[in-house]
Image: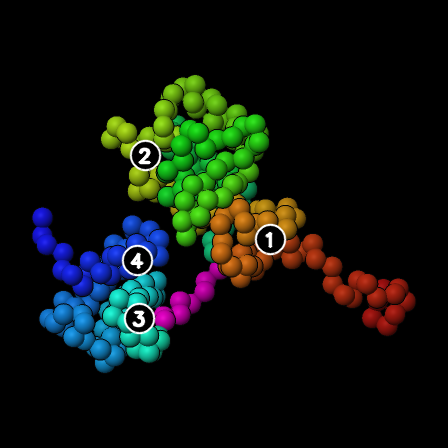
Amino acid sequence: MPRISPLRQRMIEDMTLRNFSPATQQSYVYAVANFSRHFGRPPNALGAEEIRTCLLHLTQQKRSWGHIDQVACALRFFFGITLEQPALAERIARAREPRALPVVLSAEEVARFLDAVPVARSRVALTTAYATGLRVSEVATLKVGDIDSDRMVIRVEQGKGAKDRYVMLSPQLLAILRAYWREERPETWLFPGRQKGSPVSPATLQDACRVARHKAGLTKPATMHTLRHSFATHLLEAGTDLRIIQVLPGHRRIATTALYTQVTPALIARTASPLDRLPTGHPGTA
């Protein structure tokens, strides 16, 4: 096993103290290592000019804004926390990703999509995703014991941000899960993977989405995240309070949830214009 440098070890320890997820730790270490490799020098021998050059290089390579922002966050952490150079860290600009409206499937499209999933286990997993608004990683790591039929909730352990939360358990989903359990008899993981003792991989669920989208003849993108967007949008259209919708998908900021108000034409159509509240007989009214 290759020896970990003291500097990398310190960065990992700094992230562990702040309860960063293993995935975040891995991506941050990878970003700093690539930064160092790009210039052929240790990262603690580099500074503001190299950081600027690196981020500009990623932009010119047409890398996604999400990737560039992740690299910027990693460098900000490395220089600000591990190297204790907060003034330099504050100068690292964040990449502002253009905000596109999320793609949402109609209720009829969701039904066609779920009916087209060929494998029963994947179909139940995708149905669970739509019924609860869970992220793909959260669906994949659900345990049998997370289903609380007495309280009609599902416990989500260590979701994004290492936070636990509850989501609703619909009676229809409960019936589907019970039928699935009787057929499959899962033990620990609700949706077991191919390797014994491990949960299904998120990649397997995304592959099921691709197959179902093709079979259903959908022209819109249809991924696990599309189901999550559709869940939130359909709740909003049904009149669910925005603050409740914020809690269910695990959004940290209400601004993230508020984005769905821009993609609900049904809600817009039901909104009364101030003109409708004017007294009848007023100029301009019928």
What amino acid does circle 1 point to?
Answer: Arg
**Mark 3 = which residue?**
80
**Mark 2 = which residue?**
199
User: Do residues under tags 2 and 4 come within 8 Å of each other at their CB atoms?
Assistant: no
Label 1 – label 3 distance at C-alpha: 34 Å
What amino acid does circle 4 point to?
Answer: Met
Assign a secondary structure to mark 3: helix
143 lies above or below 202: above
Assign a secondary structure to mark 1: helix
* Range of residues picked out in magenta: 94-101
**Mark 4 = which residue?**
15
Q: In the picture, residue 82 is in which quadrant?
A: bottom left
Q: Residue furthest top?
A: 182
Label 4 – label 1 distance at C-alpha: 31 Å
Q: Earlier in the sequence, mark 3 or mark 2?
A: 3
Indicate which disc residue 99 carries: none
Badge nearest the viewer, 4 or 1: 4
Which residue is at the front of the view, 13 or 47? 13
172 lies above or below 82: above
Is 98 part of what is drawn in magenta?
yes
User: Do residues under tags 1 and 2 come within 8 Å of each other at their CB atoms?
Assistant: no
Badge nearest the viewer, 1 or 3: 3
